[in-house]
Amino acid sequence: MARSLIVKVTAGSDAPERCAQAFTVAATAVAAGAQVSLWLTGEASWFALPGRAATFELPHSAPLQDLLDAVLTAGTVTLCTQCAVRRGITDKDLVPGVRIAGAALFVEECLADGTQALVY
């Protein structure tokens, strides 16, 4: 069985290097064949909205939109419930394929056998 990787990204444009690292690690893990779950929390929540990842810029970093698309293709992307509510984001606002879920699912995923969780 392939190992699973959960990447929780708490930073957005406010901490661009940390944000880009999280998306890069998630997309690289997908390319390596890992089962990947990317969690968007805090300021990273905004990347669950259409067009937001495309506006992110960081020199010498892969385009965030490409990294997000890679994870959406073969993994899961989840927006934190509380983070969504605080920002007025609902299911109808999301990029197709992104879901909203809370701490219970995050903990369940993290506690599964063969899973590694990283928080950026």
Image (cartoon, rainbow, N blue to C red):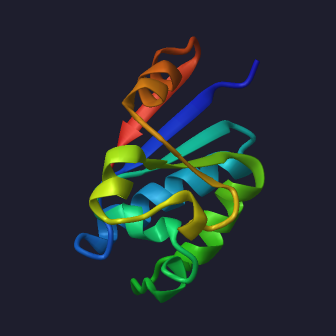
From the viewer's side, name the closer residue of 70 and 43: 43
Q: At which x and y percent is residue 88?
A: 35, 65
How many numbered discs?
Answer: 0
Q: At which x and y percent is residue 99?
A: 59, 49
**Residue that protrudes farthest toward the top in the picture:** 113
From the viewer's side, name the closer residue of 86 and 51: 86
* Left or right: 51, with 31 as reference point: left
Quadrant (top left, top right, bottom left, bottom right) of the N terminus: top right
Q: Is residue 61 above or below residue 48?
A: below
Which residue sits at x=40%, y=87%? Answer: 59
Which residue sits at x=43%, y=31%? Answer: 117
Q: Is residue 19 above or below residue 14?
A: above
Q: Is residue 80 above or below residue 18?
A: above
Task: Residue 89: name its quadrant.
Answer: bottom left
Q: At which x and y percent is residue 97?
A: 69, 57
Which residue sits at x=71%, y=45%? Answer: 32
Which residue sits at x=34%, y=55%? Answer: 85
Q: At which x and y percent is residue 42?
A: 28, 57
* Left or right: 97, with 61 as reference point: right
